[in-house]
Amino acid sequence: MNIETKFNVGDKVWGVTSDWGEKDIPCSDCHGKGGACIPDTNIFVRCETCSGSGETSKEVHRYYAVEERISDIVIRVDGNGTKMDYGYKKYIHHSTFISISEDEEGAWFEAARLSADDQAGELMPRRQATGG
Ligand SMILES: [Zn+2]
């Protein structure tokens, strides 16, 4: 069997990856105000949900476009065809790109699309490549 891969181990690529993290959102109980005044008084009552900060945090799926070197390729061939997962950071932990491209703009566009489709998603700013 001879299988051609689009990318090879060691290639520098732009990929989209994701993880979970906390995102600050306006408190739904006080609508970001941190509390409310009792009507006809100057007494401000702090919101118990956010302790008066006006924000609470929520667990969200965060999407990144990252420049990495491919460390490994996992190939699966079955009746549905050939599937290739390009991974990076093989020796730290196996991570697979959600999508992969040669150009930076393509990866950012895909990361933005994925985070927009995911209602609890967030597009993260660029981070430094960790590969060599
Ligand atoms: Zn609140």
Image (spheres, rainbow, N blue to C red):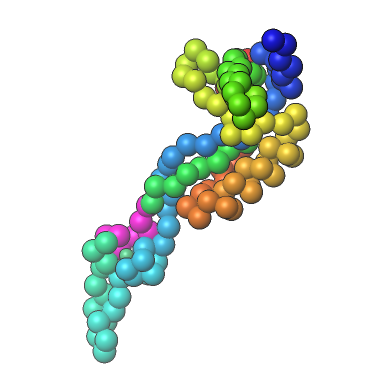
Is any atom of residue 26 visible in this view?
yes
* Furthest-bottom residue in this view: 40
37 magenta-colored: no
* Residue in view at x 39 percent, y 69 percent: 31
Is any atom of residue 67 visible in this view?
no
* Furthest-top residue in this view: 1
Vertically, is 126 above or below 123? above
Secondary structure that dominates the magenta span? loop
Q: Which of 28 and 106 is in front in this view?
A: 106
* Residue in view at x 49 percent, y 20 percent: 94
* Residue in view at x 42 percent, y 57 percent: 25
Q: How many labels does the image show?
A: 0
Q: Specify the quadrant of the image occupied by residue 65.
A: top right
Q: Specify the quadrant of the image occupied by residue 88.
A: top right
In magenta, the rendered stretch is 50-57
Q: Which of 57 and 110 is in front in this view?
A: 110
Horizontally, is 130 left or right of 42 in the view?
right
Q: Where is residue 34 in the image (x, y as percent from the top left)?
A: 33, 66
Q: In which quarter of the image is the C terminus?
A: top right
Where in the image, quadrant-wise, is ligand 1 located? bottom left
Q: Nearer the viewer, residue 71 or 23?
A: 71
Q: Where is residue 29 in the image (x, y as percent from the top left)?
A: 32, 68
Vertically, is 79 above or below 31? above
* Residue in view at x 44 percent, y 47 percent: 60
Horizontally, is 40 left or right of 92 in the view?
left
Q: In which quarter of the image is the N terminus?
A: top right
Q: Where is residue 70 in the image (x, y as percent from the top left)?
A: 63, 18
54 magenta-colored: yes
* Furthest-front residue in this view: 79
Q: Specify the quadrant of the image occupied by residue 13.
A: top right
